[in-house]
Image (cartoon, rainbow, N blue to C red):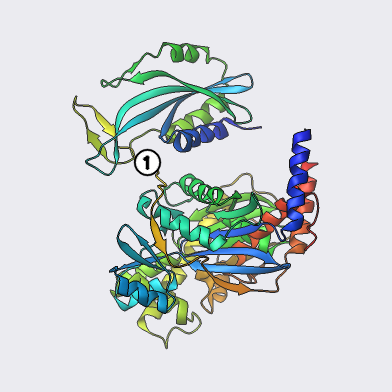
Amino acid sequence: MVTKTGAKNRRAKRAEATVEKDLGKGLDVGTAFIYCAEREKGNIVFRRQRDAFFNIEPGDFTKKMLNKINVKYIEKDGSLYVIGDEAMEMANIFHRELRRPLRKGVISPSEKESLPMIELIIQSVIGRPKCKGEIVYYSVPAAPLDADFDIIYHENIVKRFLEKAGYTPKPINEGMGIIFSELADEEFTGIGISFGAGMVNMCLSYMSVPVVSFSLSKSGDWIDEQVGIALGETASRVCEVKEKSLDLTNVKTQSHIETALAIYYDNLINYVLKSIKQEFDNNPKLPRFTKPVTLVISGGTTMPKGFLVKFNKALSQVKFPMEIGKVKMASSPLHAVARGTLIAAITDQERLEGGPHPSV
Amino acid sequence: MATVKDAIKEIKLFFRFDLGKKGTIIQVTPHPGEWKVLVEATDTMWDSTKDYRIIHERNIYEVDIDKQLNIEGYRRVGRRGKDGEIEEFSYARSIAKEDRSLNKNMVKEIAQEIAKNIPGGIGIRVREKGGMELPQTFIDPIEETQMNYNFDRLGEVKKTEQKVDKAVERLKAFKKTKRK
């Protein structure tokens, strides 16, 4: 029902929108990184922040040094926490593990001590809203198949952080974010798989409607941990090697860490495909697809060279109940989820304003 | 239209975030235009010697929630005694008697949701004077904390020439079609 008050509010919001441009933001809250996507004169601008801490001995001299070399830190309860990429570098120098506030894709209820820091980091990445109640879509994992933990807690904590910052937050399934980002030409029909740090998220969408979605608790961090245990290295060190130099097409000539990484990559890909097949086979509501379905993969764990080749090889050994057509890597695997959340936010924002924004 | 599952989820959120306590759904009764839900919640007191709150009393609340998921009201209708039995529960019992017309699917749906909420895995168990074992409750604090930091905005910036207009237009068209 359209009420007078409602119309008045909408007019006021529209007037506000003509002053501020490019409304709507997307946020990918991942275990390893937080990505924010927003528009600037119609083009997308991404912000990337590693969500990790490393605590060091506090002191005025230390703070001066950190300021001088432009290292970001938070001082809380007498402790000094270096945050971001520099935290990882320091952890590797001191051969200690990083502190990660998110584990397996979600904020752990036991991480209450670091909640204010997570809030500060999220708000500092996303910045201030361009207008009161600007819409932000943020990614959330689907319910896990192989683990039992609270997704609702995570979803609501992030929602609270964003509301406090002045946004209108809306959650969106991570796999659906990939579909929105990559499958507009396929009428938002297909399979999106995000290989993140903490989890693998999968979503099967039919005409923009999520049909099957779930997450798995093994992904990049699991690989790092397993390799670390096998070789007596810290997971942070393994992660650094994985991010900087791993080439899955040519592991024979590489280090023992890289060889072990390749073994666990095979294991992970097979595990994911087997789980997807099981879910599809057991789902009576699966739609009948008349055309082959496109599959898109994305996420930081897919970044090593040769991942797609390994994935395709494993996929050829599995028979899904629908025909798989194209298998492709997202146009920008690290940004696909954030881009998808941005598309969802702009769509909602423009529907609210009643038409395309003048700046688009 | 919201389902009973949505109503249960909403009430759990209401208890967790609005009342600041964990609510365990013990009964859902459908009424015209609304559900009446009985929730067992732990009212806590601060224990200054430890970094958590311990349970003081387990109360039974009745919550009215309409089909648009608006919480219309809630009231305390009973409490669980130290012997584990529910006291002052007469009003809630009368509601239970009305519950004759539930269809099979709804019974199943409610049972599944309630089963998920049975306490046991939540926190560590602590023993209180009187011999009854009660679960410890962790609170979700987002406390205002004094922090110093040396940044305004965070994140490495990557500017692109990517556009999203086409995807936005297509998604809008889909949403319009779905509305019709």
Left or right: B6, with B116 as reference point: right
Identity, as a three-letter code, of the amino acid under mark 1: Ile
Task: Quadrant for residue A256, please give it.
Answer: bottom left
The residue most toward the bottom is: A253
Residue displayed at 40% across by 34% down = B21
Above or below residue A88? Residue A78 is above
How many dots with numbers?
1
Q: Which residue is mark 1?
A: B139
Name the residue nearer the viewer: A252 or B167: B167
Left or right: B37, with A316 as reference point: left
What is the chain letter for disc 1? B
User: Where is residue A49 shown, x and y percent of the image?
Assistant: 50, 67
Q: Which part of the image, by quadrant, shows the C terminus of chain A?
A: bottom right
Above or below residue B146? Residue A297 is below
- Residue B110 visible to the viewer: yes
Name the residue nearer the viewer: B17 or A31: B17
Q: Which part of the image, by quadrant, shows the N terminus of chain A?
A: top right
